Amino acid sequence: MNKKTIFIVDDDSTNLMAGRNALEEHYNVLTLNSGVRLLKMLEKRTPDLILLDIEMPEMNGYETIKNLKGKRETEHIPIIFLTAKSDSDSELEGLSLGAIDYIAKPFSKPLLLKRIEVHLLVESQKQELIHFNNNLQELVEEKTKSVMELQDALLKTMAELVEYRDDVTGGHIGRTQSYLEILIKKMRTVGLYKDIISSWDTRLVLQSAQLHDVGKIAIKDVVLLKPGKLTFEEFEQIKWHTTFGEKIISRIQECTPNQEFLEYASVMTISHHEKWDGSGYPNGLIGEDIPLLGRLMAIADVYDALISDRPYKPAYTHEEAVKIITDGKGSHFDPKLVDMFLDVAEEFDQIAEQQKG
C-alpha cells in the first residue's frame, strides 16, 4: 500500500527533525522551513496533509493558509497547525481560516500519529462521499444504502476523534445515541410532540447525534482534561464547544448536497446545553424555544455524564442520576420529557451496564 505524503512546514530545524522522526515510519515526509518554500513546492507536488507552524518569518502560518485556501489547486489540502500558542483566540483564528485541527508543541508522538490517522481517514471518506454523489448513476435504493454507510463511517470517525481527545468520556457518544433512540421510540408510542417528530427521519437523527460534542476538538487539553473544578474562564471555554461544533457542521454542509442529517446534527450541537428555565448556554433559550432535539439530547447527555466518572467527580448511581434529572424538571429539563424519561429510565440503566461492561 502506498504511503500518504505529509509536508511539515516550520522554521525551526529541531521541530522539523522531530516531526520527521515521528512520522517517517508511516508516511512519506517532506520538511520545508518556510511558507514561501511550501508554495513553490506545491507547484510540483501535492501532499495528502500539511503540518503548518504559525510563527514563521517572511510568511506566517495564517498568511500561508489564506494563500492555500484561496487557490483551487490547494484549497482541498487538509492543514493541521503545529503551534506553541496556547490562547484560544489564536486557535480560533487558525481554525476559522480553514485548519482542521491544531496540535501544541512540543507534541506527543502517539497523539500526533493518531490525529493524523483520523484526519486522513475523514478526508478520504469525505472525498469518497463527494465522488459518490457526483457520479452516481445506480438505482435509488443502492444510492440510499451506500450514502448512509458513508455518512455513518464519516460521523463515527469524527466521533472517535472527539473521544480520543476527551478519553475520560469514552463511550459517551455511543451511549447517548442509544438513550436518544429509547426516548424517540417512547415519544412515538405515546404520541408526545407528534406534530414535530412526524417529520423526523429517526435513522438520520440517530446518526447525527454522534456529532453533538464534535466542537470539543477545539477545546484545549488542559481545560478538557482538568482534574478539578473549572475556573470561570475555563468554563467559558468549555461552553464554546457548542458554537464551534455548529461551525464545523456548517463546513461539512458546504461539501455535500445531502444535508438533512447535518441539519439534525447542527440543532443538537448548538442546543443540547440549553435549559428549560433559560439559564443554559450558548443562547439562553427558554422552554419550547429550545429545539425538541436539544431538549431530548440534554436528558441523554446529562444522564450519561452523571453515571460516568469524570476528573472532577466519581460516577453517580443510576438511582442518583434519575433523582437529579427528576429534580431538574421544569428548571433544567422539559417537564413532559422528564415524565417520559421516568417511564424508560430502567432501559437507560440497561444500556449503560451493557456498554460499560
Image (spheres, rainbow, N blue to C red):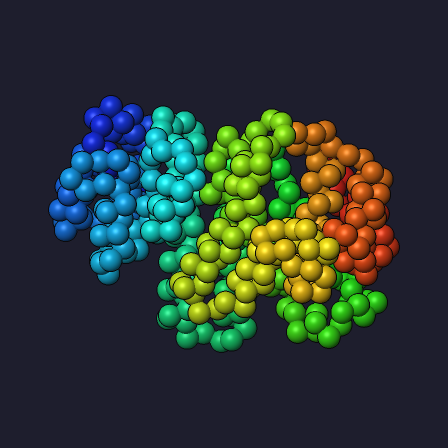
Above or below, 146 against 313 in this view is below
**Image coordinates for residue 201, horizontal then vertical, percent:** 64, 68
Question: Quick one: 35 or 115, which is closer to the camera?
Answer: 35
Above or below, 64 against 127 in this view is above
**Image coordinates for residue 158, horizontal then vertical, percent:** 50, 48
Q: Is residue 25 left or right of residue 9?
A: right
Residue at 68% x, 47% y: name it.
Answer: 301
**Image coordinates for residue 259, horizontal then vertical, percent:** 50, 67
Question: Quick one: 199 or 64, which is closer to the camera?
Answer: 64
Q: Is residue 67 left or right of residue 184?
A: left
Question: Quick one: 52 or 334, which is closer to the camera?
Answer: 334
Residue at 30% x, 29% y: name it.
Answer: 19
Q: Is residue 76 left or right of residue 164?
A: left
Pick the quarter of the image with the C terminus.
Answer: top right
**Image coordinates for residue 101, horizontal then vertical, percent:** 40, 43
Q: Is residue 252 left or right of residue 162?
A: left
Pick the quarter of the image with the N terminus.
Answer: top left
The part of the image, by quadrant, that contains residue 232 is top right
Would you say residue 224 is visible in this rendering? Answer: no
Would you say residue 278 is visible in this rendering? Answer: yes
Residue at 56% x, 45% y: name it.
Answer: 239
Question: Quick one: 213 or 181, which is closer to the camera?
Answer: 213
Above or below, 257 against 244 in this view is below
Report how many numbered discs are placed on residues in the image.
0
Above or below, 205 against 162 in this view is below
Residue at 26% x, 35% y: name it.
Answer: 55
